[in-house]
């Protein structure tokens, strides 16, 4: 599993209490892990909204994973539904301090 994880650019866990699972992949060498803080449950609507925006930003091929994470989190923070906007603090990005964030795209359209 370790050699597979070293080639993964990111893993995304959009489920309650997923930080422990995220830590396993992070320690195995995945560069970026998006997860939910260990002690937190997440509203389905917030997870869907964040995921949709995060993946759209990634697949545009103009932002790094770190930039897309921050932008998607900012979108949650400014959501008109207060319950959803309060969920922003539960999203977590695990990265090494020394990592070099890169743009993954461009991706083929279709």
Image (cartoon, rainbow, N blue to C red):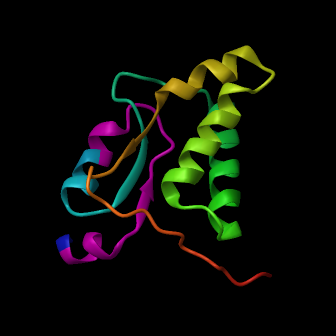
Q: Is residue 109 above or below residue 77?
A: below
Q: Residue at x 27, y 49 (%)?
A: 97
Q: Quadrant of the C terminus?
A: bottom right
The part of the chain drawn in magenta is 3-22
Measuring 31% from the left and 60% from the top, which residue is drawn there?
Answer: 99
Q: Of residues 92 and 14, which is closer to you in this image?
A: 92
Please say whether residue 42 is visible from this viewpoint.
no
Counting from the top left corner in percent of width and height, residue 12 is at 47, 53
Q: Is residue 77 above or below residue 60?
A: above
Instruction: Give me the residue at 55% from left, 52% from top.
Output: 67
Residue 25 located within the stretch drawn in magenta? no
Observer-nearest residue: 66 or 8? 66
Picture coordinates of residue 33 (x, y %)?
A: 38, 52
Q: Residue at x 25, y 46 (%)?
A: 23
Q: Is residue 90 left or right of residue 44?
A: left
Q: Where is residue 55 drawn, in percent x and y?
A: 64, 58
Q: Please state the horizontal and vertical placement of residue 30, each as a whole percent of the image.
A: 30, 62
């Amino acid at each position: 599993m370790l050699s597979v994880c070293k080639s993964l650019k990111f893993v995304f866990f959009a489920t309650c209490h997923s930080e422990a699972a995220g830590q396993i992949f992070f320690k195995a060498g995945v560069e970026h892990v998006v997860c939910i803080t260990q002690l937190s449950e997440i509203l389905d609507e917030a997870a869907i909204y964040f995921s949709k925006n995060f993946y759209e930003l990634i697949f545009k091929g103009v932002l790094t994973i770190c930039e897309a994470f921050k932008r998607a989190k900012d979108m949650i923070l400014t959501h008109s539904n207060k319950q959803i906007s309060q969920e922003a603090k539960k999203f977590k990005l695990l990265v090494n301090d020394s990592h070099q964030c890169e743009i993954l795209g461009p991706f083929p359209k279709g």
